[in-house]
Image (cartoon, rainbow, N blue to C red):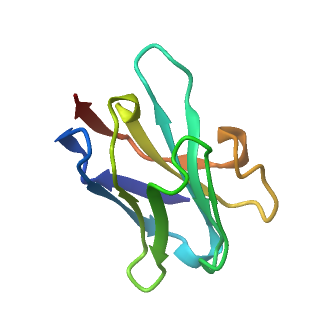
């Protein structure tokens, strides 16, 4: 079992930046694949970024490539999402998710086993 707590969301103007953090507690953090998903108002949850257990491999959704960067610090039990050049279309609740299974679909919520409560990101035009 792992508990995930996201932070760092807020209101930002288009073109601005935010850094989200997700602090994990419980089992060894480095044993989890980690991902960020987001859910815009009235829409389904969508993949934003994923990172392997060691941090050596990263994956991004097409809409955020080149603007967002996922990273992790296994010593601090934390995964980050640096978001630059934000657009109004990035407005959503952002969720941190953890995958305990060795293999799982990185790009789908079904590939993860735990998630946090979410943090709101609002980008104004």
Residue sitting farthest toward the right:
103
Q: Position of residue 9 (x, y in %)?
A: 25, 46
The answer to whether one can see residue 10 in this image is yes
Q: Is residue 60 depicted above or below 53 in this figure?
A: above
Please identify the quarter of the rendering in which residue 95 is found: top left
Q: Is residue 22 depicted above or below 37 in this figure?
A: below
The C terminus lies in which quarter of the figure?
top left
| Of residues 57 and 108, the one drawn nearer to the viewer in this rendering | 57
The answer to whether one can see residue 28 in this image is no
113 left or right of 5?
right
| Of residues 56 and 118, the one drawn nearer to the viewer in this rendering | 56
Residue located at (37% from left, 40% from top): 118
Please identify the quarter of the rendering in which residue 34 is found: bottom right
Residue sitting farthest toward the bottom:
75
Q: Position of residue 27 (x, y in %)?
A: 54, 71
Q: Position of residue 18 (x, y in %)?
A: 26, 54
Residue located at (79% from left, 65% from top): 102
């Amino acid at each position: 079992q792992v508990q995930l707590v996201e932070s760092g969301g807020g209101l930002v103007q288009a073109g601005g930046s935010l850094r989200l953090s997700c602090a994990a507690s419980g089992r060894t953090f480095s044993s989890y694949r980690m991902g960020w998903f987001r859910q815009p108002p009235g829409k389904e949850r969508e993949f934003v970024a994923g990172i392997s257990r060691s941090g050596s491999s990263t994956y991004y959704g097409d809409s955020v490539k080149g603007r967002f960067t996922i990273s992790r610090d296994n010593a601090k039990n934390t995964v980050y999402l640096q978001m630059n050049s934000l657009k109004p279309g990035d407005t959503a609740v952002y969720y941190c998710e953890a995958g305990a299974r060795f293999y799982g679909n990185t790009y789908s919520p079904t590939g993860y086993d735990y998630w946090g409560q979410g943090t709101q990101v609002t980008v104004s035009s």
